[in-house]
Image: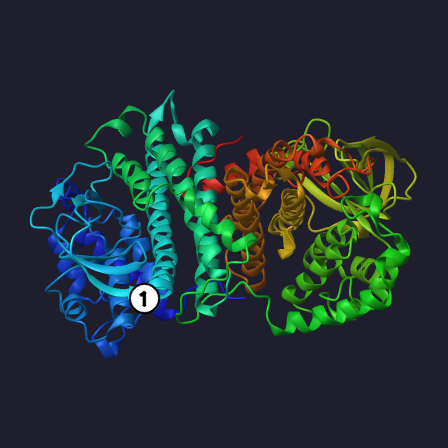
Amino acid sequence: MKLDLDDHHGLLLTSFDELFSTESSSSRVRAAEQTGFDAELWNSLTEVGAVSMLVTPEAGGGGGSLFDAALILDRAGAYTASVPLAEAMLAGQLLEQIDSRADHLRALVDGSTSVLFAPRPLHGPSELVRGGVFADAIVGLRGDDLVLLSRPQAPAPTDDLGNSGLARWDTTGPADVLATGADAHRLFSTTLTQWRILAAAALVGLSRKALELGAAYASERVQFDRRIGEFQGIAHPLANGVTEIEGARLLLWDALIQCGEGGRGAHPTAALAFGWAAEAAARATGTALHTLGGYGLALEYDLQLYQRRAKAWSALAGDPRAAYLDAARGLWDDEPKPAPSGDPAPVSFELGPKAETFRASVQEFLASDPPSAHGCDIRDGWDGHRPAFHAALAQAGFAFAGWPTEYGGSGRDPYEMTAMLQELYSAGVSLHPIANARMVGEALLKFAATELLDEVMPRLCAGDVITCLGYSEPESGSDVAAAQTKAVRDGDEWLINGQKMFTSGADICDYVFLLTRTDPDVPKHRGLTMFLVPLDSPGIEIQPLQTLSDEKTNATFYTNVRVPDRYRVGDVDKGMSVVGYALEIEHGGGGVGLFARAHLDALEAAVDWATTAPLGDGTALDDPLVRVRLARVTARARISALFNLRSLWRGAEGHPNRAEGPMSKLFSAEAYIEDAADLVDLAAPESLLTAADPASIHDGELEFGYRLSAATSIYGGSSEIMRSIIAEVALGMPRSRS
C-alpha cells in the first residue's frame, strides 16, 4: 500500500501550485470573467507543456500520465483557473491516438491552435461548448461518428454561471470524421472516463481551497466575543465538507489506479468519483460561502467564485447525476468497456504480497476448522463470540500474530493482520474480542510495565482471556476526559469506586481497560489514570442492557474494588495519553472497516433484491431511479472502505495523523446511517421484514442494517467529537468544544 506522493509527483504538485498562484491570482480570475478565458495563463500552460501533457514525447508532448494530469487539475481547481485545461489535454491525446501526424495535433502542441474535447455528445445547431469563445476546433461524438469541428465564423458567446467561456456552436455542419461506429464510441467512452477523472480532480482542488478559505475566516472573525470558529455550528459543517471532499479524492485515486491497471472497473469507478465529487463540491463550497455570512455573498470576496464554479464545472457535460446511471451500467450490466490505457498510478490501496500470502494461510485454516462448526453465526456483536473458536484461532498463531514473538505473536505487519481480519469477517466471525484485545494489547505494549506485560500478554495472545473497554460513564459519554470513577491510592493498591456505562463484553471478558480519576483538583484531561482491572475482582457488579441493534451491552459498578498497582497502565495522572493512543487505533479501523463492511453488506442485499423484484416487464434494477440510488450508495460504501485503508496506511507507515482516523469514523458512520435508511425505503415494504420472517431480504439484512447503523455515530466517539477534531486538525480551526 502506498498513499503518499513520490518526489516527482510532489515536485509536480508544488510547481503547478506556484504557477497557478501567480498566473491565476484572484485579480486575474476576475479580469477573465467576461470571456471565461485567460490568454496569458493559457500561454504559460502551453509553454510548460501542461496543455500537451498527455501527448507522447514522440509527438512533441510532455508524455505525462493521467495521474500527473489529475494533480495539475487539482491545482487548477484550487485557483479557479480560467482555462479549459482538461478538455485541451484530452483533445491532444485523442488526436494522437487517431493520427500522430495530424496538423491539428502539431498545432496544439506548439500552441498555435487550440482544440478541445467535448464531453457531451453533439446534437444540434446551437450546442454549448466550453471554451467555445476562443477554441479553434473541438473533438466530439456526433451520432456514430467521432468528428473534428472547426469553430464557426461567429460563435455566439454566453453569460454563464461559472464564467466557463461557453459559446454556442452549430455542430451540424461539415466536419472531419476521425472514427466511425464502434471505434468512435470506444474512443469517446474512454476519453469521457478520463474527463470525469480530471473534472473530479479540479472539483476536489477547488472545494478543498474553498473550505480552507472559510475555515481561515472563521478562525479570525469575532462575534459574541468569540471567534466564530469556536462555535460547533460553524466548525462542524466545515468538517463535514472537508471529510466528503477527502472521500472524493480517495475515490478519484481509486479510479486512477484502475485506469492504470486497465481493468473493467475503471469506467464505473471514474463515473462514481465524478458523481460524488460534483455532489460534495456543491455542498462544500456552499458551506464555505455560508461561513462568511453576508460577506460570502459580496462579489468583492472570492468564495462566490468557488461556489459558482463548483456547480458550473460539474454540469459542463450535462446533469452530473447521469454519471451514477453510467456507473450502474458498468457495475450491473454485462457491458464491458475497454479501460483507458495509461501508466500505472504511483499510489495503491493493495495490502501487498506479504499480506496476500498470509491471507491464503488464514483461508486454509478457516477451511480446515470452519467457524460455522463452532456456531459462529453472529458477527455483529459480542454475542457472536465463541471461546473455542477464539482459542483455536489464537493457538494457530493468527488472532494476535502482529504482536512480538516474546508474547506469543509472530511480528506480522498491520497489512497482514488486516488481511486476516477481512477473512474472519467474511467467514462470519465476531471481531469484537479481537479488535478490543488489539487496542488494549497495543496500549499495554506501549505504556505498561514489564510485570503486567508478562502476566497478561501471553494469555491474551493464546486466546485464554479477552478484554473490554471501560471509558463511558452515565455523565460522560464521548467526553471520556470527564470520567469520575475514582481511584485512590492505598499503599501498593488502588481503591476504585464508580460506574461505567456501555461496557460491552464485560459479562464474558476477563479484564476491563478502565479509565479512572486520580486527581480531582486539576483540569479534567490531566488527573486521569488507566488500569487493566481483572473482572473477577470483588466489588464489581455487571448489569445487562439490551440495545436497538440486538447487541447486549452492560452497566458496570465498582464498589471498593482493590487493584494492585502492577495493573496500572502508564503514569499516574497521564491516562489521557493511554486512552488517546487506544482511540487512535480504534478510529483508524485497522483497515477492516466494520462500518464499511456492514454498509457493503446492506448494498449487496439491496442489489440482490433489485435484480429479482418485479417491476413492469422487468425488475427494479431496470428502473433508472433505482440504479442511480444504488450507484450512489456504492460510491459512499467504497469511500468508507478507502478511508479505512488510508487510516491503516498512515498508522502502519508512522505518518503524522491529519485527522484521517476521525474522518474515517465520521464518514463511515454518517454515510451508513443515511444509506441504510434509503435502502429500507427503496426496497419497502419487504425491507421491513426481520430475519425471523422467511420472506425477509437477505435474512433481514436491510431491516437489521437500519437498526445497526444508528449505533455507528455513537460507538467509538460520537460524530460531534469527530467533527471537532477534524475542524481543528485538518482545517486548523480553534477548539470547538470545552
Q: Residue at x 65, y 34 (%)?
A: 680
- Residue 718 x %, y %: 61, 35
- Residue 480 x %, y %: 65, 36
Q: Secondary structure at mark 1?
A: helix
Q: Is residue 675 left or right of residue 436?
A: left
Residue 428 shows up from this direction: yes
Q: Quadrant of the N terminus?
A: bottom right
Closest to the observer: 97 or 285? 97
Which amino acid does the dot numbered 1 rest on? Leu
Residue positioned most to the left: 153
Q: Residue at x 44, y 51 (%)?
A: 271
Closest to the observer: 546 or 571? 546
- Residue 619 x %, y %: 61, 42
Q: Quadrant of residue 346?
A: bottom left
Q: Quadrant of the C terminus?
A: top right
Query: How many neighbours does mark 1 have within 10 angstroms: few (below 14), some (14-19), or many (20 or more)?
Result: few
Residue at the spot of label 1: 11
